[in-house]
Each structure stands twice: as structure tokens, then as C-alpha cells.
Image (spheres, grey):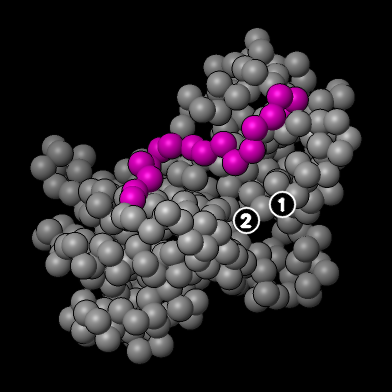
Amino acid sequence: MTRDLLYRDALNEALHEAMDEDATVFCIGVGIAERGGSYKVTDGLLAKYGPKRVIDTPIAEPSVVGTGVGAAITGMRPVVEILFVDFSLLVMDQLVNQAAKLRLMTGGQGAVPLVLRTQGGVGDGVAAQHSQSLEALFYHIPGLKLVMPSTPHDAKGLLRAAIEDDGPVIFIEHKLLYMTEGPVPEQDYTIELGTADTKRSGRDCTLIAWSNMIPRALEAADILVGEGLEVEIIDPRTLVPLDHATILESVRRTEHVVIVQEAVRRGGIASDIASVIQAEAFDYLDAPIEIVAGLDTPIPYARSLEQACIPQVEDIVAAVKKAVYA
């Protein structure tokens, strides 16, 4: 049985279930307790679990994440919230030099079962310092896992899996997805990290996208089917680990590839996925891989300029046509 939930409510339900089942799970961050978080993902947790497990902090991100890393090393399972992914730049030492390396430096004896929840991407006119897509920074770091769900179903199942993982896991939610709605099973479930999902089947082109680019990819596919093109949409869901098998199987069938990311193209994840396809499925490609990505610029405040900086549905449609008809 399923019911429709908002993306934010699916995340909230995942946190309730995880905290019910495991007393070592706790939440910590700015404004997450009495306010329930700026996007209401932690709403109701304080009343149920109390201030020792739902901890409001000062605006001091390095100390907050440092506390989470230390707690995780000692056996707790913290879920740390950083309000904007932009602010994660303040905690790179804790994540990159400490959390990501502990397992290796202890010969596999140590673990850091920490989840860092944050939100990123463009939307709401919050300007250059609150609109970045910084996932490529984490993608580059050995020892970090990276999750970017696009639907309420995936958000809940992947958050449950991330909390159970021995981590550390970076869990990036898009600010424009919180109020989107979709079916979520009533029973408990998890989604294994590293498993992609085929959001739509097709024969003519493989379209790889994630996070808020999935709704736009689906809209583009609806337009293209009216023109006789069937697009297969692959959502990696977790970028680290990346499900190579699902991506390559689709590419070998369709022989055309478009990769869409909201982040700027330079040094981006789309380019790395393209390199994997080139190395493993080059002989199957019938045309060059097309990449649709954000412009190489800070995000402006003005809504019209904001939208001009990131891929739109018409850009995706054009890229698919170029790939198929090349």
C-alpha cells in the first residue's frame, strides 16, 4: 500500500522511523528543534524525542559537524543538518580530512556513520551564496558517499539507508523538491545506496539526470514522445557509489546519450559519467554524448537571470534531438 507524501514529509517520516528503531540516532543543526527546520523536515522530532536527541545549535557549522564526526566515531549515528549546501564549504576540514579518511587510517577498524543533510540548487531567488550546486566537490573525495534523491519515495528510502550506512554520507536535497508530492509505501523500506532507477523506459536515447533535473527530464520526454522519440530516463539517485551497470545497459540499447546536471559543466559529474560511458560502451555509441549543464557563472538574484543559468526543458529537448539526429 502507498499514499502520497510531500518530499519533506517523506524525509521527516524516515527520521522518525530511524530514531524509533535506534537510540543512537540523533539530529543536530541550526534551527532544527523548536522551528522544525527551515523546510520542516525535522518538524515534530523535538516533542517526541527531546532535546538530547534533537539538538539546536548556534550558527557555527564547523563545530556542529565536528560534534557529529566525534559522536559518530564513538558509536552514535548523527544526522547533521547544514541549512544550505553553500555553508558546507565551512566544514570541509571535518568532512574531507577527518570523516572521509578515518576508515582507511584505522585499517578498517574505525567508522564514521554520519549523515550530513543539506539542500542545494537554484530556486526561490536566494542569489549567489545560497543557490549553488556543489555536489562535484564531494564526488571528488574518496571515502564520502553522495546521495541526491529526486522523489519522495527515493528520499525516504535513501535516507533510511544512509542512516544505517557506516558512512559518512552526504545527502543533498533540492530546495524546489520539498513541496513536490509522490507515492510512498506505508511499510518500512530502504533503497540500497548505489542503485539507479529507471524513471521512464525508452528505446531512442538514454537521458541521465538527478535531483531537480528529473522532473524537467520527464517533462522533456513527454514533449519528445509527441515527436516520435522515446527517451529512457535513468536517475542514479546515488552519485557515489554510482550504478555503472544500469547506465551502461541502457546506453548499449539506445546508442544515444544525454546527461543533464544543474551544476556548471566545468569539472562536473556529468563529464565523469560521460568518461565512464566512453570507456565502457564507446563501440555502442551512434553519436557524441551531449551534456546539458548550468552556465559558468554565479547564480544571479533576478528570477529571469536565475533560470537562464540552468537547464530548462527546452534545452533538454534540443539536446536529445541533437544526439539522436546527429
**As displayed, is residue 137 above or below residue 108?**
below
Seen at 30% across and 79% down, the residue is 45
Residue 122 position by quadrant? bottom right
Q: Nearer the viewer, residue 267 or 3?
A: 3
Q: CA distance from mark 2 to mark 1?
A: 7 Å
**As displayed, is residue 250 above or below residue 68?**
above
Where does residue 50 sit, x and y in percent of width and height?
Answer: 21, 84
Q: Could you tell me which quadrant the C terminus lies in? A: top right
Question: Mark 2 sits on what residue?
Answer: 212
Where does residue 318 sit, x and y in percent of width and height?
Answer: 85, 40
Residue 216 numbered tag: 1
| Residue 21 belongs to magenta span | no
Secondary structure found at label 2: loop
Where does residue 228 sit, x and y in percent of width and height?
Answer: 85, 31
Tell me: 124 left or right of 48. Answer: right
The residue carrying pointer 1 sits among few (fewer than 14), some (14 to 19) or many (20 or more) residues within 10 Å by Cα, namely many
Seen at 18% across and 49% down, the residue is 111
Magenta span: 189-205
Where does residue 157 sit, x and y in percent of width and height?
Answer: 39, 52
